[in-house]
Amino acid sequence: MIQFVMSDLDGTLVPEGSSHLPQRLVEAIDCLQRQGIPFAASSGRQHASIRRVFQVLEQEPLIVSLNGGCICRGDECLYLDPMPRETALAIAREAGEFQGCDVILETPDQCWVYRGENGVIHELEVRSYHFAQVRQLSEVTGEVVKVACFLPHRVEAFLAQAKANWGDKVKVARSGGMWVDFNVADKGKGLRAACRLLGIDPANTVAFGDNLNDEAMLAAAGEAYVAPAGNPILKARYQVTQDPVAEIEKILENFKKRLAF
Protein backbone atom coordinates (compact mmCIF):
# COMPACT_ATOMS: atom_id res chain seq x y z
CA MET A 1 0.00 0.00 0.00
CA ILE A 2 1.43 3.38 -1.01
CA GLN A 3 2.11 5.55 2.04
CA PHE A 4 4.40 8.28 0.68
CA VAL A 5 4.97 10.08 -2.63
CA MET A 6 8.15 11.95 -3.55
CA SER A 7 8.69 13.79 -6.82
CA ASP A 8 11.30 15.78 -8.61
CA LEU A 9 10.18 19.27 -9.65
CA ASP A 10 11.86 20.67 -12.79
CA GLY A 11 11.16 18.64 -15.91
CA THR A 12 8.86 16.28 -14.01
CA LEU A 13 6.04 18.32 -12.47
CA VAL A 14 6.76 21.69 -14.08
CA PRO A 15 8.86 22.96 -17.01
CA GLU A 16 12.50 23.69 -16.17
CA GLY A 17 12.71 26.78 -13.93
CA SER A 18 8.94 27.27 -13.59
CA SER A 19 7.39 28.39 -10.30
CA HIS A 20 3.75 27.61 -11.09
CA LEU A 21 2.03 24.28 -10.38
CA PRO A 22 -0.87 23.28 -12.65
CA GLN A 23 -4.19 23.49 -10.78
CA ARG A 24 -4.91 19.81 -11.41
CA LEU A 25 -1.65 18.90 -9.70
CA VAL A 26 -2.42 21.17 -6.73
CA GLU A 27 -5.79 19.46 -6.31
CA ALA A 28 -4.24 15.99 -6.55
CA ILE A 29 -1.54 16.69 -3.94
CA ASP A 30 -4.04 18.38 -1.61
CA CYS A 31 -6.33 15.35 -1.84
CA LEU A 32 -3.39 12.99 -1.33
CA GLN A 33 -2.33 14.71 1.86
CA ARG A 34 -5.91 14.98 3.16
CA GLN A 35 -6.02 11.20 2.95
CA GLY A 36 -2.92 11.00 5.15
CA ILE A 37 -0.40 10.20 2.40
CA PRO A 38 2.52 12.64 2.76
CA PHE A 39 3.99 14.31 -0.32
CA ALA A 40 7.59 15.50 -0.64
CA ALA A 41 9.11 17.72 -3.30
CA SER A 42 12.68 16.61 -4.04
CA SER A 43 14.83 18.96 -6.10
CA GLY A 44 18.30 20.24 -6.63
CA ARG A 45 16.89 23.70 -5.95
CA GLN A 46 17.29 25.71 -2.76
CA HIS A 47 14.74 25.17 0.03
CA ALA A 48 13.24 28.67 -0.27
CA SER A 49 12.77 28.29 -4.03
CA ILE A 50 10.95 24.94 -3.73
CA ARG A 51 8.85 26.14 -0.82
CA ARG A 52 7.64 29.13 -2.82
CA VAL A 53 6.39 26.84 -5.59
CA PHE A 54 4.35 24.70 -3.18
CA GLN A 55 2.96 27.50 -1.03
CA VAL A 56 -0.36 27.13 -2.90
CA LEU A 57 -1.05 23.78 -1.20
CA GLU A 58 -3.43 23.46 1.74
CA GLN A 59 -0.78 21.61 3.76
CA GLU A 60 2.92 22.32 3.34
CA PRO A 61 4.79 19.26 2.03
CA LEU A 62 8.19 18.03 3.08
CA ILE A 63 10.84 19.96 1.14
CA VAL A 64 13.81 17.81 0.17
CA SER A 65 16.24 20.32 -1.29
CA LEU A 66 19.78 20.36 -2.67
CA ASN A 67 19.55 16.87 -4.23
CA GLY A 68 18.49 15.20 -1.01
CA GLY A 69 20.97 17.00 1.21
CA CYS A 70 18.45 18.95 3.29
CA ILE A 71 14.94 18.09 4.51
CA CYS A 72 12.68 20.72 6.03
CA ARG A 73 9.11 21.04 7.15
CA GLY A 74 8.29 24.71 7.13
CA ASP A 75 11.23 26.56 8.66
CA GLU A 76 12.44 23.54 10.63
CA CYS A 77 15.44 21.63 9.28
CA LEU A 78 14.96 17.93 10.02
CA TYR A 79 17.96 16.44 8.19
CA LEU A 80 21.22 17.74 6.74
CA ASP A 81 23.96 15.98 4.74
CA PRO A 82 26.70 18.57 4.06
CA MET A 83 29.92 18.23 2.07
CA PRO A 84 33.32 18.48 3.77
CA ARG A 85 34.08 22.19 3.52
CA GLU A 86 37.53 21.85 2.01
CA THR A 87 36.22 19.47 -0.64
CA ALA A 88 33.44 21.87 -1.60
CA LEU A 89 35.82 24.81 -1.85
CA ALA A 90 38.36 22.83 -3.87
CA ILE A 91 35.66 21.75 -6.36
CA ALA A 92 34.42 25.32 -6.70
CA ARG A 93 37.94 26.64 -7.18
CA GLU A 94 38.71 24.13 -9.93
CA ALA A 95 35.33 24.57 -11.66
CA GLY A 96 35.82 28.33 -11.68
CA GLU A 97 38.84 27.86 -13.92
CA PHE A 98 36.81 26.03 -16.59
CA GLN A 99 35.95 28.41 -19.42
CA GLY A 100 32.26 29.36 -19.53
CA CYS A 101 31.43 27.82 -16.15
CA ASP A 102 29.45 29.69 -13.50
CA VAL A 103 29.83 28.29 -9.97
CA ILE A 104 27.52 28.44 -6.98
CA LEU A 105 27.88 26.96 -3.50
CA GLU A 106 24.66 26.19 -1.68
CA THR A 107 23.95 26.02 2.04
CA PRO A 108 20.48 25.34 3.50
CA ASP A 109 19.66 29.05 3.66
CA GLN A 110 21.90 30.76 1.12
CA CYS A 111 23.36 30.44 -2.34
CA TRP A 112 26.84 31.87 -2.83
CA VAL A 113 27.72 32.87 -6.40
CA TYR A 114 31.46 32.42 -6.89
CA ARG A 115 31.47 32.81 -10.68
CA GLY A 116 28.49 34.39 -12.40
CA GLU A 117 29.35 35.73 -15.84
CA ASN A 118 27.47 33.27 -18.04
CA GLY A 119 23.84 33.67 -17.06
CA VAL A 120 23.52 31.91 -13.71
CA ILE A 121 22.29 35.09 -11.99
CA HIS A 122 19.25 35.14 -14.25
CA GLU A 123 18.62 31.44 -13.54
CA LEU A 124 18.69 32.10 -9.79
CA GLU A 125 16.38 35.07 -10.10
CA VAL A 126 13.86 33.06 -12.13
CA ARG A 127 13.85 30.42 -9.40
CA SER A 128 13.47 33.02 -6.60
CA TYR A 129 16.74 32.07 -4.89
CA HIS A 130 18.28 33.81 -1.92
CA PHE A 131 21.80 34.50 -3.16
CA ALA A 132 24.85 36.69 -2.69
CA GLN A 133 27.96 37.10 -4.82
CA VAL A 134 31.46 36.56 -3.40
CA ARG A 135 34.87 37.29 -4.85
CA GLN A 136 36.77 34.92 -2.58
CA LEU A 137 35.70 31.46 -1.44
CA SER A 138 36.74 32.40 2.09
CA GLU A 139 33.63 34.62 2.17
CA VAL A 140 31.32 31.61 1.98
CA THR A 141 29.71 30.82 5.35
CA GLY A 142 27.50 27.96 6.50
CA GLU A 143 27.57 24.26 5.71
CA VAL A 144 27.88 23.67 1.97
CA VAL A 145 25.53 20.91 0.85
CA LYS A 146 25.94 21.28 -2.90
CA VAL A 147 28.25 22.86 -5.46
CA ALA A 148 26.43 23.51 -8.73
CA CYS A 149 27.94 24.57 -12.05
CA PHE A 150 25.98 26.28 -14.81
CA LEU A 151 27.33 25.82 -18.34
CA PRO A 152 25.35 27.16 -21.33
CA HIS A 153 27.97 25.46 -23.51
CA ARG A 154 30.44 22.56 -23.17
CA VAL A 155 28.52 20.88 -20.38
CA GLU A 156 29.49 17.37 -21.56
CA ALA A 157 33.18 18.24 -21.59
CA PHE A 158 32.93 19.69 -18.10
CA LEU A 159 30.96 16.69 -16.83
CA ALA A 160 33.62 14.29 -18.11
CA GLN A 161 36.38 16.30 -16.43
CA ALA A 162 34.41 16.61 -13.19
CA LYS A 163 33.78 12.86 -12.97
CA ALA A 164 37.44 12.09 -13.69
CA ASN A 165 38.70 14.51 -11.03
CA TRP A 166 36.03 14.18 -8.34
CA GLY A 167 33.91 11.10 -9.05
CA ASP A 168 35.75 8.98 -6.49
CA LYS A 169 35.16 11.57 -3.73
CA VAL A 170 31.66 12.96 -4.29
CA LYS A 171 28.58 12.33 -6.41
CA VAL A 172 28.73 14.14 -9.75
CA ALA A 173 25.53 14.29 -11.79
CA ARG A 174 24.04 16.24 -14.65
CA SER A 175 20.89 18.09 -13.66
CA GLY A 176 18.81 19.50 -16.51
CA GLY A 177 20.37 20.65 -19.73
CA MET A 178 23.02 23.04 -18.43
CA TRP A 179 23.79 22.08 -14.82
CA VAL A 180 26.30 19.75 -13.17
CA ASP A 181 25.88 19.11 -9.44
CA PHE A 182 28.36 17.92 -6.80
CA ASN A 183 27.07 16.41 -3.52
CA VAL A 184 27.82 13.79 -0.93
CA ALA A 185 24.04 13.57 -0.62
CA ASP A 186 21.71 12.15 -3.24
CA LYS A 187 17.96 11.97 -3.68
CA GLY A 188 17.94 8.30 -2.73
CA LYS A 189 19.50 9.07 0.64
CA GLY A 190 16.98 11.89 0.93
CA LEU A 191 14.06 9.54 0.29
CA ARG A 192 15.30 7.03 2.86
CA ALA A 193 15.88 9.82 5.41
CA ALA A 194 12.35 11.15 4.83
CA CYS A 195 10.97 7.63 5.31
CA ARG A 196 12.79 7.33 8.64
CA LEU A 197 11.35 10.67 9.76
CA LEU A 198 7.85 9.56 8.78
CA GLY A 199 8.16 5.96 9.99
CA ILE A 200 7.46 4.55 6.51
CA ASP A 201 9.06 1.62 4.71
CA PRO A 202 10.68 2.83 1.43
CA ALA A 203 9.00 -0.16 -0.25
CA ASN A 204 5.68 1.66 0.27
CA THR A 205 6.73 4.77 -1.66
CA VAL A 206 6.35 6.11 -5.18
CA ALA A 207 8.92 8.42 -6.80
CA PHE A 208 8.83 10.50 -9.99
CA GLY A 209 11.85 11.94 -11.82
CA ASP A 210 13.32 12.82 -15.17
CA ASN A 211 17.09 13.29 -14.94
CA LEU A 212 20.17 11.42 -13.80
CA ASN A 213 20.26 13.21 -10.44
CA ASP A 214 16.90 11.47 -9.78
CA GLU A 215 18.21 7.95 -10.35
CA ALA A 216 19.09 7.17 -6.72
CA MET A 217 15.61 8.29 -5.64
CA LEU A 218 13.93 6.14 -8.29
CA ALA A 219 16.04 3.15 -7.25
CA ALA A 220 15.21 3.63 -3.56
CA ALA A 221 11.43 3.84 -4.04
CA GLY A 222 9.03 0.92 -4.13
CA GLU A 223 7.60 2.20 -7.42
CA ALA A 224 9.35 4.57 -9.83
CA TYR A 225 8.18 6.57 -12.83
CA VAL A 226 10.08 8.67 -15.37
CA ALA A 227 8.56 11.72 -17.07
CA PRO A 228 8.06 11.40 -20.85
CA ALA A 229 10.90 13.79 -21.71
CA GLY A 230 13.21 12.11 -19.19
CA ASN A 231 16.76 10.92 -19.69
CA PRO A 232 16.92 7.88 -22.04
CA ILE A 233 18.99 5.92 -19.51
CA LEU A 234 16.25 6.28 -16.91
CA LYS A 235 13.50 5.54 -19.43
CA ALA A 236 15.22 2.23 -20.20
CA ARG A 237 15.28 1.24 -16.52
CA TYR A 238 12.00 2.48 -15.09
CA GLN A 239 8.35 2.84 -16.06
CA VAL A 240 7.61 5.87 -18.24
CA THR A 241 4.47 7.85 -17.45
CA GLN A 242 2.96 10.32 -19.86
CA ASP A 243 1.23 12.09 -16.96
CA PRO A 244 2.65 12.07 -13.40
CA VAL A 245 -0.53 13.76 -12.13
CA ALA A 246 -2.61 10.87 -13.46
CA GLU A 247 -0.40 8.43 -11.53
CA ILE A 248 -0.98 10.42 -8.32
CA GLU A 249 -4.70 10.32 -9.01
CA LYS A 250 -4.49 6.53 -9.43
CA ILE A 251 -2.77 6.26 -6.04
CA LEU A 252 -5.72 8.14 -4.53
CA GLU A 253 -8.26 5.92 -6.25
CA ASN A 254 -6.54 2.74 -5.07
CA PHE A 255 -6.22 4.11 -1.54
CA LYS A 256 -9.94 4.91 -1.38
CA LYS A 257 -10.81 1.45 -2.73
CA ARG A 258 -8.76 -0.18 0.02
CA LEU A 259 -10.49 1.92 2.64
CA ALA A 260 -13.87 0.80 1.30
CA PHE A 261 -13.16 -2.85 2.07
Image (tube, grey):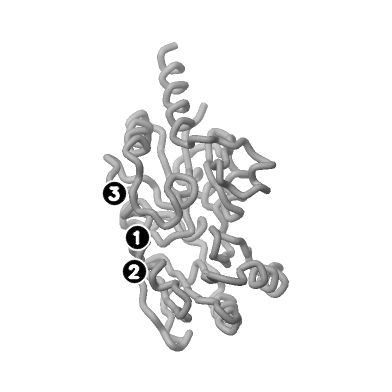
Q: Give the class, few, some or many, for how many residues have Cα within 10 Å of label 1's Cα (few <14, many ≥20).
A: some
In terms of image quadrants, where is residue 60? top left
Under mark 3, the amino acid is Gln
Task: Classify the position of the C terminus by image quarter.
Answer: top left
Relative to residue 22, is residue 2 drawn left or right?
A: right
Residue 147 in view: no
Classed neighbour count for the residue bearing mark 3: other residues with Cα under 10 Å, few (<14), some (14–19), many (≥20): few
The answer to the question of whether label 2 and label 1 lie on touching residues, with beta carbons closer than 8 A, is yes
SS class, disc 1: helix
Q: Which label was assigned to residue 130? A: 2
Of mark 2 and mark 1, the one earlier in the sequence is 1
Residue drawn at the location 44% of the way across and 35% of the way down: 245
Q: Nearer the viewer, residue 247 or 221?
A: 247
Q: Position of residue 30 (x, y in %)?
A: 32, 35
Q: Quadrant of residue 111?
A: bottom left
**Element assignment for label 2:** loop
Q: Where residue 223 sits: x, y (%)? A: 58, 35
The answer to whether residue 172 shows anywhere in this view is yes
Q: Residue at x 69, y 69 (%)?
A: 160
**Residue at the spot of label 1:** 48
Farthest-out residue, front: 153
Residue on which disc 3 sits:
55
- The tag earlier along the polypeptide, 3 or 2, is 3
8 and 152: which one is in front? 152
Q: CA distance from mark 2 to mark 1?
A: 7 Å
Placement of 126 over or under 225, stated as above or below:
below
Name the residue nearer the viewer: 223 or 96.
96
Q: Between disc 1 and disc 3, whose residue precedes?
A: 1
The image position of residue 161, as x and y in percent, is 69, 73
Of the residues shown, which amino acid type is indicated by label 2?
His
Q: Is mark 1 in CB contact (under 8 Å) with mark 3?
A: no
- Left or right: 122 with respect to 225? left
